[in-house]
Every structure is written in structure tokens, then in C-alpha cells.
Image (cartoon, helix red, strand yellow):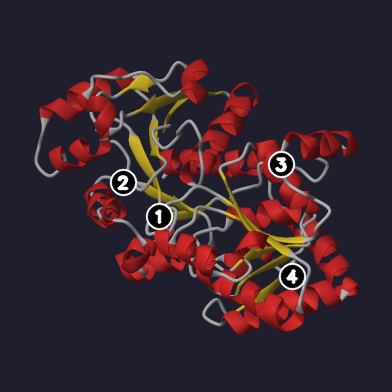
Amino acid sequence: MLKICLDATPIRDKPSGVGVYTLNLIKALDQLQESENFKLDIYFQPTFKNWLSRNFSPNTLIQSYSPHCLPIPVTVTNALMKFPNPLLDYFSRSLDRPNVVHGTDHFVYPNPKSRNIMTIHDLTFVKYPDYVPTIVKTYLDRIKNCLKFTDAIITFSENTKRDLVELLKIDPNKIYITYQASRYHTDYLTEQQIEDLKVSISYDFNKPYFLFVSTLEPRKNVIGLIQAFNYLKQYYKIKHQLVLIGQTGWKYQPILDMINQSPYRAEIHHLNYLSDDLVALFYSQAEAFIYPSFYEGFGLPVLEAMTLGAPVITSNSSSLPEITGDGALLINPNDSMELADAMLNLIRDRVLRDNLIRLGKEQANKFSWGKTAQATLNVYRSVLNS
């Protein structure tokens, strides 16, 4: 029987980004085990902080999978990989002889007796190093170490595949695309659930609002969004609020300063991290979802917004046009006035808004975590048969 061992290290108590991908992939692969005749095992490596405190307990979200613990953090593993080290081989024995080891976050553990596959989400740290923190800048070094023994790369868009070929000189035949999917489906919330959720949070849904969902960091261009919002409030007196849902990431202080300095700061709401159901509520009730990111390897929030019926305005760069198809208005992320014009057109033109909702749902229906899991399983088998 085919045995797969997948890295759950990126999953945190409040997963976002890489963690959301990893957790949903595990759940979807788990459901395929019996019908596709393979065995899925999970492993994780402790954070550096947990390693120092000798805490090797798995995250609560993966405890039910009885994961294996490789008791050294990724940063230490990367350092040891630079020269032959029997310690790495010793730890890999706990993986129970898998046919494939799949690293899900720009790294794969060097297991010498398996085929090794690495997921690379994007190349922000190469193309836009000013947009990433110091720890992410080390990703290039660890990717280069892993490429010496990696049999295949998984990524999420043709755009990122081109980046991998052009910037890292990876053989395109070794790169596989497995699109991600939304956490939600189009009928995720019933009308009763919507009403119950509305009363569970202190927010006035009677006022129309623009929505942004993601980590607050420079790459997401939140400052450009606030500039566009300020312009519309000042010159067009729009009644809308601006809702920002997401944890603060790296270099977030200028974003918070921009909010505090806005003449309309009382109408800009940063709600930090919310449950999946509450995020779904805000998607479903939004006048529009705005995602003017400078660069994305996939762009999961735009897909979630389209799934739940929010018309989308997003950037015309990187992977975003590929993911949205005809289901979004595309703007230049470097031009906040172009963004403001698109926002204004959307709230003035109800036919445009309705068409975007319809086309967005049609586009979103092309993606599912079941398809992602099946495509990922096909990669495993392709590598083993090559």
C-alpha cells in the first residue's frame, strides 16, 4: 500500500495562509484513504521556542491524526542538512518508512528512503524581499538545500510555476500545480445561522461596508485600500464602512497609523482574528470584497469571497487574474485612484455587482479541497512511477 507522510508543522491554533492549506489538505486526503487505497501519516517539527522548552506536543488541531514528532525545529534541520549528518537519518526512522514525504511549507525533511515533495507557495521573498520579515528571507536558503534531494515541487498557479522556473531555474517538468480551494461552499450559512451570528458579535450590519480579509502586512497593500476609502469618503460622501479582518503580521504599524490618522477612522474597523463562521458572515454581507495585494501565489481570500457571494475587486498582477477568471474587477495595485474608481463603479452599478456575484460563484465552483487532494495524490503517484 502507498504510504504518505505529510508535514503538519505549519498548523497553528489559529491557522492562516500556509496553515489553512495544510489543514484542509490533510482533512481531504484523509477522506480519500479508503477509496484510493493509501495510508496517510502526519508528522510535525516543534517550533524553536517549544524545542527549547522540550515541548513536543502536537497542535490540538492534528492530535486526532496521531502525528509523529521529529524532535528538532526546521531551522536546526536546515543547518544540519548542509553537511552529512547521521542525526537526521536517525530521526527519520520515526516516519515508519513512507513512500513519499511531503513538506508543505517551503521545506521537506530529508528522508533518504522516500520520494520527497515540497510545496512552494510563492516567491515573495525573492521578488519582493522588502515585503517579508527576516525569517521568511531565509526560505530561499532552505529551499535551495531541499532542492538537492527533492523529487517534485507543488505550487498553486501557473504564475508561480513561471516564477520558479525563471528565478530558481527549476525544471518545469518537476513542478505540479494543485489549486487550493475555499473553506466554504456557496450554501455555507443558512438564513437562521446568519441572523444568529449577527447578534453574536458587536457590529452594526445595517451599514454597508467594504471588506478585506488577510494578515495585515505590507504585501497586502492595505494602505492603498485605506487611501482609496478615504478618497471616496471625502469626495463622494459614501455611506460605507471599511472592515479589515486579520491578524497583524509584519511591519503592520504603518497600517495601524494610517487607520488612526484617517479622518474617517471611526468608520474603519479592524476586527483581528475571527472564527470561520464569523468570517463567512462578513463575506456574505459585504457590499464588496477588496483585495489589492501586490503579489500572491494563489489568493485564497478572493476565492472565499466569490464562494460566499461577495463581488470582488482585486489586483491584475501575479496569480490573481488566473484564480478569479471573469469573476472579479481587476485593478492596478499601485494606483489607489484606480481602486477607488472600481469601488465607486461597483456601488453605483447594481447590474455590474449582480453579474460579478454570479460569475464569481461560477468560478469558485471550479475549486474544491477534494479536487486539491486528488490532484496532490496524483502527484505522489506520478513521482513514484517516474
Q: Quadrant of residue 229?
A: bottom right
Residue 351: percent from left, percent from top: 90, 73
Q: Residues within 10 Å of mark 2 (few under 14, many from 20)?
A: many
Residue 169 shows in the view = no
Q: Quadrant of residue 323?
A: bottom right
Residue 292: percent from left, percent from top: 58, 69
Separation of disc 3 and disc 1 at Cα?
49 Å
Q: Which sits earlier in the primary sequence, circle 1 or circle 2?
A: 2
Q: Quadrant of residue 72?
A: top left
Q: Which sits earlier in the primary sequence, circle 3 or circle 1?
A: 1
Residue 222 shows in the view = yes
Identify which residue, 25 or 136, lies in the foreground: 136
Q: Residue 326: give its label.
A: 4
- State yes or no: discs 3 and 1 in contact (Cβ < 8 Å): no
Q: Which sits earlier in the primary sequence, circle 2 or circle 3?
A: 2
The amino acid on which the numbered mark 3 sits, given as a three-letter code, is Ser
The amino acid on which the numbered mark 4 sits, given as a three-letter code, is Asp
The amino acid on which the numbered mark 2 sits, given as a three-letter code, is Thr
The amino acid on which the numbered mark 1 sits, given as a three-letter code, is Lys
Q: Which sits earlier in the primary sequence, circle 4 or circle 1?
A: 1
The residue that label 3 is drawn on is: 202
The residue that label 2 is drawn on is: 150
Q: Residues within 10 Å of mark 3 (few under 14, many from 20)?
A: few
> Horizontal placement of 312 versus 322: left or right?
right
Q: Residue at x 65, y 25 (%)?
A: 35
Q: Which sits earlier in the primary sequence, circle 4 or circle 2?
A: 2
Q: Is residue 1 above or below residue 310?
A: above
Q: Residue at x 38, y 43 (%)?
A: 117
Element carrying mark 1: helix
Element carrying mark 4: loop
Separation of disc 1 and disc 2 at Cα?
9 Å
The residue that label 1 is drawn on is: 174
